[in-house]
Amino acid sequence: MTSHTPETLSAYLQQMETLLNLPLPPERHDAVLLQLQRIAEMAQPLMDYPLEMREEIAGVYQL
């Protein structure tokens, strides 16, 4: 199980701001952080679903 703490998500967001050269004002940073936390919470049941070793991953399609 992956732990998406507010600290790790905030660090991720700060890294993306730097990488994309897209600094966010504090109020926008907080709003995006809140959305990332909500996404992580919604995705957790799917991430926790056990897959057997014989399960194949989805194909990768390229143009």
Image (cartoon, rainbow, N blue to C red):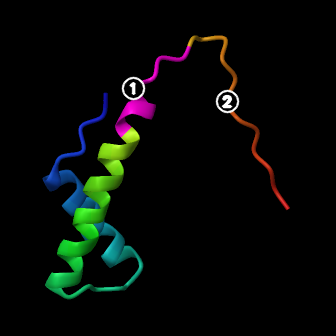
Disc 1 target residue: 48
What amino acid type is highlighted by mark number 1? Asp
Is residue 52 a member of the stretch shown in magenta? Answer: no
Q: How far across and down, in percent of the image, does residue 54 sit?
A: 67, 11
What amino acid type is highlighted by mark number 2? Ile
Furthest-right residue in view? 63
Q: How many numbered discs sit on the rendered protein? A: 2
Residue 14 badge: none
Is 49 situated left or right of 60 in this image? left
Quarter of the image containing the N terminus?
A: top left
Residue 57 badge: 2
Quarter of the image for residue 58 reads top right
Quarter of the image for residue 51 reads top right
Q: How far across and down, in percent of the image, does residue 59 sit?
A: 76, 38
Is 56 situated left or right of 18 in this image? right
Of the pair 9 and 31, the residue shown nearer to us = 31
Asked if 21 appears above or below 43 in the picture, the reply is below
Q: Are marks 2 and 1 in contact (CB under 8 Å)?
A: no
Quarter of the image containing the C terminus?
A: bottom right
Q: Residues within 10 Å of mark 1 (few under 14, many from 20)?
A: few
Distance between the alpha carbons at the discs numbered 2 and 1: 16 Å
Q: How far across and down, in percent of the image, does residue 15 sit?
A: 30, 68
Helix, strand or loop under label 2: loop
Residue beneath the point at 75% across and 45% down? 60
Magenta range is: 44-51
